[in-house]
Image (cartoon, rainbow, N blue to C red):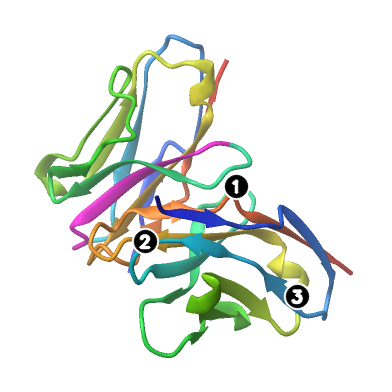
Amino acid sequence: AQSVTQPDIHITVSEGASLELRCNYSYGATPYLFWYVQSPGQGLQLLLKYFSGDTLVQGIKGFEAEFKRSQSSFNLRKPSVHWSDAAEYFCAVGANQGGKLIFGQGTELSVKP
Amino acid sequence: EAGVAQSPRYKIIEKRQSVAFWCNPISGHATLYWYQQILGQGPKLLIQFQNNGVVDDSQLPKDRFSAERLKGVDSTLKIQPAKLEDSAVYLCASSPDRTTQYFGPGTRLLVL
């Protein structure tokens, strides 16, 4: 069965520090992988996606993610965090044809001044 | 380009009452999804439409939830009667190609 695990429920980083949010997935075929961000009281905004090709993908707001098939991982990174990045981050896997997304439980990011 | 629109944004009802949510997808997007997001969890798919046909409603509690997408554009999700455990955010998303999904702001439902 398809599943997504985000091991860290809550992470706190200092402003200006680097960030890595972990995501592991379980999926039988080549997955479509996504990272979304959700600010309080808002819907989900797409940060980046991986379908195929280059395993390092760039997204909006300075985020990037790397697909590692051998580790079934799709970790999100940012070299320097801004206070406005405080939000909840969701990793999701999609079936090639079905379009349905399976989400992880989310990682809440807090940013210290 | 306008995003996915949802209304109302907030709703408070008593248990056993009924409630309806409305979604207007991005223009031209054939696929529409309704997700339920319970506090502290990731969204879970309730139902997926392709144009005005249902593709996947395997996770929809059909004894109380119903959804329709007349004319393949707007969609309505209804709960009747509501239970306490239905308190959640209901997210609508649309996709032009069944790969990338674009989400609306959600409707926050509180059942008392």
The answer to if B35 sits in the magenta stretch is yes
| Location of residue B53 in the rendering, given as x and y in whole percent from the top left corner | 12, 43
Label the magenta part by its dominant secondary structure.
Answer: strand
Q: Which chain carries label 2?
A: A
Quadrant location of the N terminus of chain B? bottom left
Residue B103 vs residue A57: left or right? left
The answer to if B7 sits in the magenta stretch is no
Which residue, given by chain and number where applicable, does mark 3 sit on?
Answer: A82
Vertical relation: A45 (above or below) A69: above
The magenta segment is B28-38
- Residue type at the position of mark 3: His
Q: Is mark 1 on a helix, strand or loop?
A: loop
Q: Distance between the residues labelled 2 and 3?
A: 29 Å
| Location of residue A59 in the rendering, given as x and y in whole percent from the top left corner | 52, 80
Which residue, given by chain and number where applicable, does mark 1 sit on?
Answer: A41
Q: Mark 1 lies on which chain?
A: A
Q: Do the residues under discs 3 and 1 have CB atoms within 8 angstroms? A: no
Residue found at x 60% / y 79%: A63
Residue found at x 37% / y 16%: B18
Q: What element carries label 2?
A: strand
Residue density around tag 1, few if under 14, some if 14–19, many if 20 or more, within 10 Å: few
Same chain for mark 3 and mark 1? The answer is: yes
The disc, 2 or 3, on the residue closer to the chain's N-terminal end is 3
Q: Mark 3 lies on which chain?
A: A
Q: Nearer the viewer, mark 2 or mark 3?
A: 2
- Residue type at the position of mark 2: Gly
- Judging depth in this view, the residue of A25 and B81 nearest the camera is A25
- Judging depth in this view, the residue of B29 and A72 nearest the camera is A72
